[in-house]
Amino acid sequence: MKTVFENIKGVIFDYGGTIDTNSVHWAEVLWAAYVKMEIPVEKQDFRDAYVYGERAMAKNLLVKPTDNFHQVLRIKTHLQINRLVELELLKADATQQVIYAEGVADICYQHVLDILVMSREVVRKLAEKYKLVLVSNFYGNIETILKDFQLDSFFSSIVESHVVGVRKPDPAIYQLGVDAMGFRPEEIVVIGDSYSKDMVPAKKVGCKAVWLSGPAWGKEEIDPNLPDVTIHSLLEVLDYLL
């Protein structure tokens, strides 16, 4: 198995869905929390509210650079719940809205803490052998989050969409990661959970690619032969890179 990556010198990591949820799309993590909180809303309505919230957070300065991930989750969940109530898809007074939003945020934050017990150790082990760079679509506070989760010391550089002004799936953001790495693209492995946002642009810039494949969120055409390796848990990457 290791022969696939014989001449690798560096690893580019995606963050959301990869390090923090181990292949599960964030919409599914949130939906599981909605179910646990017994919030009376249809999944499709939640999906629409999720997309609305993500777009609002990407376009507007709702997240401060000093916000940790629990604060980010609170912003997300309040946007979603408020949207559902606004469209009369969820009946809840002001107090209940807060209970729903805060409850979902708390559940999801604990979920990430549980996943990080494993994923932090994977990142640590890879950092002992390879140079690591993070490439992420995020809100301008990824450095705060990495520090909060004790991940900041492992990455030599961070390429964050909000900071550099380009977002996945644009291959340009991965080219910035390659430039920050300082190695040839073929000497770099990209690890990410999204086929279209990680695998496709990584291969376009010439990197090797490990697809952390999990439950599908949207419908997209997938060429299973595009990634060099497909795994289903971040732990599996150690079999190929160590």
Image (spheres, rainbow, N blue to C red):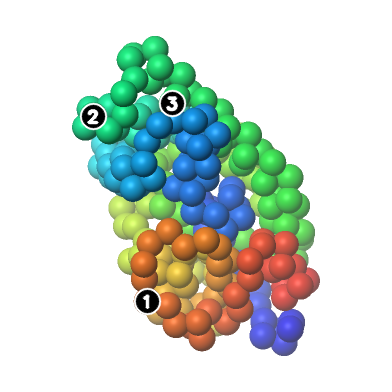
**In contact (CB < 8 Å): disc 2 and disc 1:** no
**Secondary element at image label 3:** helix
Name the residue: 56% across, 28% down: 106
Q: What element carries label 1?
A: loop
Return the x and y of residue 119 as percentages of the image width and height: 69, 52
Residue type marked 2: Glu
Query: Who is closer to the viewer here, 87 or 24?
Result: 87
Whether residue 154 is situated above or below residue 181 in the rendered picture? above
Check the image and report above or below for 197 versus 222. above
Q: Residue at x 55, y 75 (%)?
A: 209
**Front position among marks 3 and 2:** 2
Q: Give the labeled residue for mark 1.
A: 221
Q: Which mark is residue 101?
A: 3
Few, some or many residues within 10 Å of mark 3 (<14, 14–19, 20+): many
Mark 1 or mark 2, which is nearer the start of the sequence? 2
Q: Of helix, strand and loop, which one carries label 2?
A: loop
